[in-house]
Amino acid sequence: MVWKPGIPLRRDEPVYRVSATDAETVASAQSCPLALALKVRPKTSPDTGEWTRRRGPFVLGVLADAIQDVGLRVKHGYELWDAVRLQARRFGSQHEGVRQFFDHALTQFFEYHEAREEEVGPLRFLDGWPDLQKGPRASLFAWALLYETDTGCREIRRIRVATASNKLTPWAYVAGHIAAQYQTSIEPQRIWVTEIGLNDGIEFHLISGESPDRVEELYQSDGRDAVLATTKGEERIPGRVCGGCEYLGGCESLIPLNGFLQTDNPGPWTRSVSASDLVLYETCPSRWYMEREVHLPRVEEGSEPLLRGLATHQWLAQAHGRSKACTADELPNPADIDRLGIVGEAAVDPGDYELAYPFLRSHIDCCPLNDDSIRSLTAERTLYAFDAQADAVIATKADAFWLRGDTLIMREIKTVQVQPEADRDQIFSAYLAVAWDLVALETGFISHFGAVRGEVQLEILSPDAAVVHTYSTDDEALMRMARGRIRRLGRDWLADVQWAPTPNPGCTRCSVRRWCGIRDAWADAVATKVDAGAEDISLTS
């Protein structure tokens, strides 16, 4: 099949370099077929005018380099743990949370390594980016660590930041193929493909001690087609991968939101951001960085507010997707599980539905689809846009988009146990999503959907009431406040490369507090001031 990407190309050479991860990604719902096809063609360049993707630091690569260095030092006579201890100097320029995680990760990885050597004998490090030429214009590679014993046992290890997966995907078959075909002076006898979780040190052998012939059979039956599929993609599907795509600056599938972040000064590299990113960043830049940018292992504490909010959104997304108003008949009492019906059954776990039930009942009377003049566009779908001035992908997930005449409506739904005693302006200040949506409407969504004006509806649900606050893009004073808030947060977020921690009351519940060097600073300050009899426990007083 001839590849027809449907985009302008500066250069197009049929050279292919496909990774095991690419082969795994091709079947993912979050994959963009065109972006992947461009990625595996290192000598093909899309024409994006003056725009060029600016790459950010590959933080996990620093850890992989350290693991490789340990392997090389051991080959040259170092004791294993002496070589591990030397790696700390590599991490000096990293964020403190990353340093702490890397130290932990090295320990987990090499404790597994020691245990593995007790099973199969001494393991010699071969490569950290094993590569396999498939012809003059094609190669396969894996971002993985390859080892072998003198007796021909080979193990290729994939490292996972958090926990390993035992799911067999094309990654395992491609990685096994590379490991079996890798050329050394020792003939391979048995092949292992292993995932290691760097948070808990637990491993899964996806392919366990198979012969090279069997590994080749697995590749031919379950890996090769996925490799070939990576080269054929032509469809553009906006999603989480947009920020890493070489065609980002020219992609017409992204909604243009030029000027959204209210700045002419882009950050140091091409970025992606959502409203929840800025909310988290405003609370603590360090937490945002550890959670959202480098994805350090997290400890999530499930809470009733979180579960009820998710269940409410899931049920309403399913219901509003039918373009018909919600009714009480579709909300049986949670005790009557058999009568959840197609909406609830498809959307919500029965236990979570019980938490959401009173909030969903409150929604019935204010369901916007009771208005026959409203046309539903989408529900609970993330819209991806591009702010060319800030060189940033803008991800917006309102609970629903509707058209009423020439007005584009974005609906945000929040659940609270008790309705806040606050006026419209105070509500605006409390929920960044309102300012975010207003500026998104003004800078591109209105024109994209063929509307003239925009409106944000903030629906606050409690067990006994529903209150809807409405904000219009026609209100210039309001728009000035919205632009100002996005400008301040966006400017700080774009420019930040330090991500300093900000102690706050949420520190005790922070999902990445394990990696934070001052995780107890807020609690200690509170205790000190209470002991001193102070009423003000602010750290900035």
Image (tube, rainbow, N blue to C red):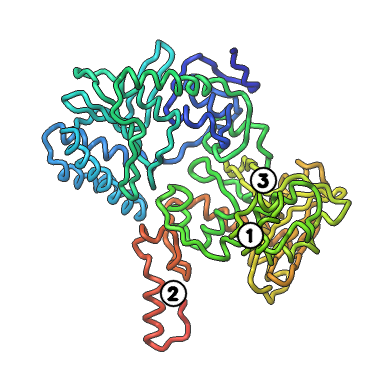
Residue in the image at 66% along x and 74% along y: 418
Based on the displayed image, in which of its 4 quarters is residue 434 positioned? bottom right
How far, Cα to Cα, is label 2 from label 3? Answer: 39 Å
How far, Cα to Cα, is label 3 from label 1? Answer: 21 Å
Q: Amino acid at mark 1?
A: Tyr
Based on the displayed image, in which of its 4 quarters is residue 517 positioned? bottom left
Q: Is residue 530 left or right of residue 468?
A: left
Secondary structure, mark 2, is loop
Based on the displayed image, in which of its 4 quarters is residue 129 positioned? top left
Secondary structure, mark 3, is loop
Mark nearest the camera among 2 and 3 is 3
Q: Amino acid at mark 2?
A: Leu
In this view, the residue in front, 324 or 514, is 324
Q: Which mark is residue 353?
A: 1
Spot occupied by residue 412 in the image (x, y as percentages of width and height): 70, 57
Q: Is residue 101 above or below residue 540?
A: above
| Residue bearing mark 2 | 539
Mark nearest the camera among 3 and 1 is 1
Q: Is residue 489 above or below residue 210?
A: below
Determine if residue 220 is in view: yes
| Residue bearing mark 3 | 381
Q: Which mark is residue 525?
A: none
Determine if residue 62 is in view: no
